Amino acid sequence: MTENGKASSRPTVAERSSSAAIAVDHLVKIYKQTRAVDDISFSLPRGSITGLLGGNGAGKTTTIAMIMGLVLPTSGRVQVLGHGMPEESASVLGRMNFESPYVDMPMRLTVRQNLTVFGKLYAVKNLSERIAELADDLDLTEFIDRANGKLSAGQKTRVALAKALINRPELLLLDEPTASLDPDTADWVRAHLERYRRDNNATILLASHNMLEVERLCDRVIIMKRGRIEDDDTPEAIMARYNRTTLEEVFLDVARGRVNGAKEAAR
Amino acid sequence: MTDLSLPRGISVQRIGAMILRYWYLLMSSWPRLLELLYWPALQVITWGFIQYYIAENSNFFARAGGTLIGAVILWDILFRGQLGFSISFLEEMWSRNIGNLMMSPLRPIEFLLSLMVMSLIRLAIGIIPMTVLALVMFHFNVYALGLPLIAFFCNLIFTSWSVGIFVSGLVLRNGLGAESIVWTLMFAILPLACVYYPVSVLPAWLQAIAWVLPPTYVFEGMRALLIERTFRIDLMLDALAINAVLLGASFWAFLALLRSAKKNGSLLSGGE
């Protein structure tokens, strides 16, 4: 409410949080002496694709893990699809999914068995049809009855993506989704993610070292360094601000501490 | 597909999914199946012959036929029950799948319930052939114990789950560096639970500790049944009461260790 008692047209923090897919508020994570994430805040609207950029140890994986509820914050708040994490995780875990190089799927189970198990965990309706649909979309049919441990890196990534999409998530968290893939497979995965977002109005947050990937996929970029947010805008606005033509050049400026110089040169 | 839910939001479907996951794994690996049979069979053959030898040279053991072989079978229920629980849990750590599960709608209680069911399945695969072997080779019919066997079994399996839940929490918190606890903790109970000898053999101060462990009541109960032909229901009820406390405490400890793992980020690393 405003001072004169009339309702303000601007949404309150609570309203913004509830309508956002992800709302992170003054999030801090300290491991012993290390501040892995240092007081970051951001909010992602539903239907957006956002890239989380930063060098090794920038805090990207810890941030994503806190959003998923796998790591507890030292302080601050995370809201996912309008629910506080991790205390209300039961209300949202079925509506989100993730893919990360830090986890694998059971190696001895076949692709079909793995997708069946995860489909049942996520209470997917018409599971057989959903698995067939994913196998068709992600080109898994040829090896769907082969053990996961016998697949190539590219095939495993596609299977992990199928697991991440099995429940048609409203929110998809991806940590290095195309790491260790050849350029052709990586491009194919990116095209699939774009299509999934468009067709389902899904929200995607991806951490990546691949600047071309972020430029192509993301309508917003959050750059992290030493646990803090260094910049947060559209890829075009960030490149303009640093007077650079690629995000890779911006990344190098940030990583090598040339931030002020680059921004001043742009002015 | 309809999500079958019990009160308090526990999902039968999610528990079933986890059991299916472990069943797929067992069926895909003959060494895993063989291992379930191999050790119990080896145990019963070794101790069966020891029982024969001692019975030939001792009037007491000749009268108390089956106390050693019975103790071996009951000990294996306790030990294999815990291993059956913990190995299924370790499979998730070894395959780096624990993050996928923690991020899914699966709840900790559902995960633990599925591990309990798997411990029963793995136990059945190992123990049933063991009891048949004991009957055929040594004429010891464990099923002749009748209803008391159910009381022995329930008390031992409850203890095995308590230990399994607790050590799984330790591995979750400390990573696979703590894996050796899974294989060794139960052996710390072995001398105190008086598997092969009566509690009266222990010094008085150790007897006090022994009576804190539910398996002590079971093995004393077994000896009472085989030697004195008496079913000590009082011992079984005492064991059940202690087991209820232990199960509650182990579940609380698991949740506390899970929370601690989330605090220090070990769910992401899972390694040593």
Image (tube, rainbow, N blue to C red):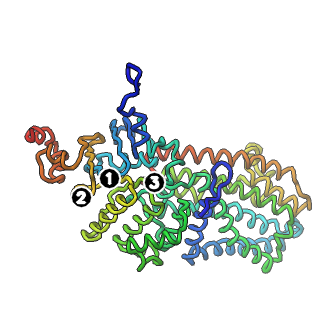
- At a point 45% along the width and 54% down the height, the residue shown is A96
Q: Are marks 3 and 1 on the same chain?
A: yes
Q: Mark 1 or mark 2: name the one nearer the start of the chain.
A: 1
Mark before the other along the chain sequence, 3 or 2: 3
Q: Tell whether label 1 touches label 3 (CB within 8 Å).
A: no
Residue at the far front in the pictured view: A6
Parent chain of label 3: A
Vertical order, A90 against B143 (above or below): above
In the rendered structure, which amino acid carries the disc numbered 2?
Arg
Kind of residue at badge 1: Ile
User: In the rendered view, does B10 fall on the left or right side of A162?
Assistant: right
On the rendered image, what quadrant is the C terminus of chain B found in? bottom left
Of B11 and B184, the residue lying toward us:
B11
The alpha-carbon separation of the residues under discs 3 and 2 comes to 23 Å
Q: Is residue B120 above or below residue B261?
A: below
* Residue B230 appears left or right of A212: right
Quadrant of the rendered image containing residue A189: bottom left
The chain ID associated with circle 1 is A
The residue under label 2 is A216
Q: Which residue is mark 3?
A: A96
Give percent across and percent down for residue B157. 72, 58
Q: Where is mark 1, residue-wise?
A: A49
**What percent of the width, then of the height, locates residue B97?**
48, 61
Does residue B242 lie above or below A147 as drawn? above
